[in-house]
RNA sequence: CGGGGCGUAGCGCAGCCUGGUAGCGCAUCUGCUUUGGGAGCAGAGGGUCGGUGGUUCGAAUCCACUCGCCCCGACCA
């Protein structure tokens, strides 16, 4: 039967779409730019939510929910913020059959409504810090959309915290950045670069924007999460003040931070191959699939029984699926579960039964290992851990191999076209140089590392003095 | 918004140039044989050809308008 997915080398962008549609992670909706997240895609998001939510709570955050609709006037209160978001907002002008007195914005992000509420709730330094997160949908009217990476409506979490001092807010923003970084590596098996955005890439209304940048297989960078130190910008716009110990009034210092369903797209692009998507064991909705192989009725009975017993044994510790369908062949099942990204497959046929074993096959490279039926759970646990670790290691090697130094502009341009990836290059700090590089090469400064990049050099574009290098890349 | 492509059965497509009873593959259903990498044979069901209007004896096919989607660019998580 014909391959259902366009090979990556032929057309990476088609491959991405094919992999998602064919694996049934998502589908296009009747509304342009929107997508339906199907059970496979959604359960990945649930896995992401579960793990991140636990980490947020461990660090003292609580969940809450703020409404979808925001009065238009709220958005206008912070000048930079409104300039940044107004063009991409969906606006509700009618309700209940009548034109509304004040139009309502469908939230593109919730800073404004949240700070309006914080202004009511915060009176004293004793009320601080406020550490709230919400899991929500937001809408941004993007011109060009792509499944999971950029859709008109998407799901995310947005944390919004308020603190008594600038130092506390800064500490919070960095703490979250570190949570994100570790999550990306430990759970998603995607290594990232972290750092701070330049002014031009900063969140509208933030003092500083910290970010995670990952590298996809087509050598383009993907922003995987952001954490903003908002300073007192929103506090001033919304009059969020508190009384200090000395009785003076001060504006709070705040942060906001988020990751979105884009992470699901990152998983696809980081780990998928021409056979479909491929998920790291810790996030895989199904970690182990059991596939029986039989010929005679007698074999069918014995082998399906062995599968049932194994599934029973593994069920407590792993997310397991026993594929006992009789209407499709084993070969069909192999392909289907590979397409859907299951990291480990256990085959059992007459030959395995004879040796009292399962044949384990790793999704990431199809490597086969016999696993004795006794102590199966232990063997499976070890294999899954091994796969998780190797997927991360593979990602690390990929990131390392595709990060280069760029000292000379023409050489940089050539290397961008030839190899892509990240480039460490000196930048004088001028917005003009940054803009010209973007116009001339389509590469942007992905982030300025927080440490380890101090070094005297010459700006890639103008040759002026530079004291630190930054990461450049073409990005999604 | 600019450039390109596509709307014909659930999915993928052919047919359109040169108008004349709507086809192929996959999927689905039934039966038998199969099962260690997408099984075989036989049979069956399924389509107002994106929409509207026009030309014509006759339109999937020609013309006009329109709607939608995908890809590439400018904006962005």
Image (cartoon, rainbow, N blue to C red):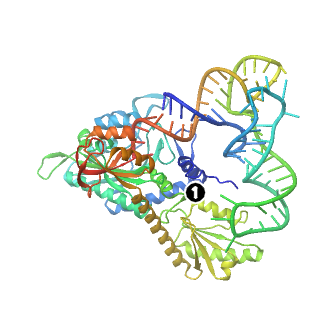
A199 and A463: which is toward the camera: A463
Density class for disc 1 (Cα within 10 Å; few <14, some 14-19, many ≥20) is many
Q: Is residue A304 left or right of residue B69?
A: right
Q: Can residue A115 be seen in this snapshot?
A: yes
A123 and A72: which is toward the camera: A72
Horizontal and vertical percent position of residue B63: 68, 21
Horizontal and vertical percent position of residue A393: 43, 65
Horizontal and vertical percent position of residue A160: 32, 50
- Residue extending farthest to the left is A246
Name the element at disc 1: loop
Is B63 above or below relative to A143?
A: above
Q: Residue at x 32, y 56 (%)?
A: A176
Is A119 above or below relative to A224?
A: above
Q: Residue at x 51, y 61 (%)?
A: A279
Marks counted in the figure total 1
Is A327 above or below relative to A380?
A: above
Quarter of the rendering containing residue A67: top left
Q: Residue at x 31, y 60 (%)?
A: A60
The chain ID associated with circle 1 is A
Q: Residue at x 51, y 78 (%)?
A: A378
Q: Is residue A397 left or right of residue B54?
A: left
Residue carrying label 1: A276
Q: Is residue A98 left or right of residue A328?
A: left
Q: Quadrant of the N terminus of chain A?
A: bottom right
Horizontal and vertical percent position of residue A426: 28, 49
Is A267 above or below relative to B66?
A: below
Q: Can residue A159 be seen in this snapshot?
A: no
């Amino acid at each position: 039967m014909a391959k259902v997915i366009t090979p990556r080398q032929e057309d990476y962008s088609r491959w991405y779409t094919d992999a998602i549609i064919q694996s049934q992670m998502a589908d296009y909706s009747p509304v342009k730019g929107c997508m339906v997240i199907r059970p496979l895609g959604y359960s990945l998001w649930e896995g992401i939510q579960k793990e991140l939510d636990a980490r947020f709570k461990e660090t003292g955050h609580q969940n809450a929910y703020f409404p979808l609709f925001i009065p238009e006037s709220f958005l206008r209160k912070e000048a930079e913020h409104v300039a940044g978001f107004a063009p991409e907002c969906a606006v509700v002008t009618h309700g209940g059959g009548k034109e509304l007195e004040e139009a309502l914005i469908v939230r593109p992000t919730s800073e404004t409504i949240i700070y309006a509420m914080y202004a009511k709730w915060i009176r004293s330094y004793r009320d601080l810090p406020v550490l709230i997160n919400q899991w929500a949908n937001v809408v941004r009217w993007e011109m060009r959309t792509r499944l999971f990476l950029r859709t008109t409506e998407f799901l995310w979490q947005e944390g919004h915290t308020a603190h008594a001092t600038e130092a506390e807010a800064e500490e919070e923003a960095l703490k979250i950045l570190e949570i994100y970084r570790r999550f990306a590596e430990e759970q998603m098996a995607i290594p990232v670069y972290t750092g701070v955005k330049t002014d031009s890439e900063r969140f509208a209304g933030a003092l500083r924007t910290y970010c995670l940048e990952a590298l996809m297989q087509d050598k383009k960078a993907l922003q995987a999460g952001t954490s903003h130190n908002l300073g007192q910008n929103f506090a001033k716009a919304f009059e969020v003040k508190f009384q200090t110990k000395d009785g003076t009034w001060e504006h709070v210092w705040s942060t906001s931070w988020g990751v979105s369903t884009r992470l699901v797209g990152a998983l696809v692009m980081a780990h998928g191959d021409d056979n479909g998507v491929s998920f790291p064991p810790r996030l895989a909705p199904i970690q182990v699939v059991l596939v029986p192989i039989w010929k005679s009725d007698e074999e069918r009975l014995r082998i399906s029984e062995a599968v049932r017993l194994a599934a029973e044994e593994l069920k407590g510790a792993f997310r397991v699926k026993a594929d006992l369908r009789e209407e499709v062949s084993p070969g069909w099942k192999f392909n289907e579960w590979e397409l859907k990204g299951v990291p480990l497959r256990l085959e059992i046929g007459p030959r395995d039964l004879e040796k009292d074993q399962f044949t384990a096959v790793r999704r990431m490279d199809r490597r086969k290992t016999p696993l004795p039926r006794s102590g199966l759970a232990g063997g499976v646990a070890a294999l899954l851990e091994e796969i998780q670790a190797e997927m991360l290691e593979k990602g690390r090697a990929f990131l390392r191999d595709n990060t280069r130094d760029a000292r000379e502009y023409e050489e940089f341009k050539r290397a961008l076209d030839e190899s892509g990836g990240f480039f460490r290059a000196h930048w004088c700090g001028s917005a003009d140089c940054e803009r010209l590089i973007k116009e001339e090469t389509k590469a942007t400064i992905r982030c300025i590392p927080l440490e380890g990049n101090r070094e005297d050099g010459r700006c890639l574009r103008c040759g002026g003095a530079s004291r630190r290098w930054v990461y450049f890349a073409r990005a999604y």
